[in-house]
Amino acid sequence: MLGRKRGNLRHERRWHQSRQSHKPSRKRYNAIVDPKLNVKYMKRYQNWILAGTSGVLLVLSYPSFNLFPLAWVGLIPLLVSLKSTSSWKSTFWLGYVTGFLFFLGTIYWIILLYPYANIFLTTFGCVILVAYLAAYLGAFSALLSRIPWQSGLPFIFVASAIWTGL
């Protein structure tokens, strides 16, 4: 304070408050301890968690796990997450995550071809194939997001037509 002139008190308060807001927050580290912060982060990633859950439910409905009733409800978490998003890009990526997990869990057997081919080649081919096939669920989600939920058309019929058309 020796070489500085005392200026407007309101300006000094604003400067002091802005300096305090740039201090590192301990909220990140307390998220494990405080359940309210866990709920905050859970809401932030809720759509991604639902999309991942949908992919896992679809994988579990296939014969290797033999939980076939999950096939009837496997897409419901994805549809719930699509309802709360607004842009077609975010709906595409939610569908892509669902498709990536689904196809990764069902086409894993391609990696098991490594006795007949190079392990790196089969793994790379499997990942490329999964990424390609996941784009179909992403396209389904993006097209489905363009249809209003309260349209005159029955939503179930439109969704099934898009699913079959792809």
Image (cartoon, helix red, strand yellow):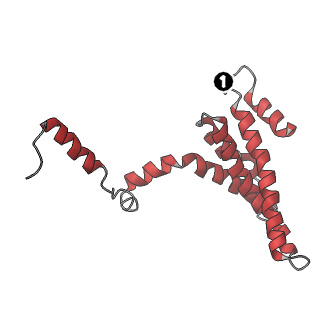
Of residues 143 and 46, the one nearer the viewer is 143
Find residue 131 and report its image quarter: bottom right
Image position of 122 (left or right of 29): right
Of residues 161 and 13, the one nearer the viewer is 13
Amino acid at circle 1: Gln
Compared with 33, 96 (above or below) is above
Compared with 36, 120 (above or below) is below
Compared with 113, 138 (above or below) is above
Residue 96 point in image, percent of width and height = 71, 49
Image position of 76 (left or right of 13): right
Image position of 53 (left or right of 69): left
Find residue 35 and report its image quarter: bottom left
Residue in view at x 13 percent, y 36 percent: 8
Quadrant into which the C terminus falls: top right
Residue in view at x 64 percent, y 39 percent: 82
Residue in view at x 61 percent, y 42 percent: 81
| Residue sitting farthest toward the top | 152
Q: Is residue 62 visible?
A: no
Q: Secondary structure at mark 1?
A: loop
Residue in view at x 75 percent, y 32 percent: 156
Residue 16 point in image, percent of width and height = 21, 46
Circle 1 residue: 150
Residue 113 point in image, percent of width and height = 87, 73
Of residues 58 and 112, the one nearer the viewer is 112
Residue 153 point in image, percent of width and height = 75, 22
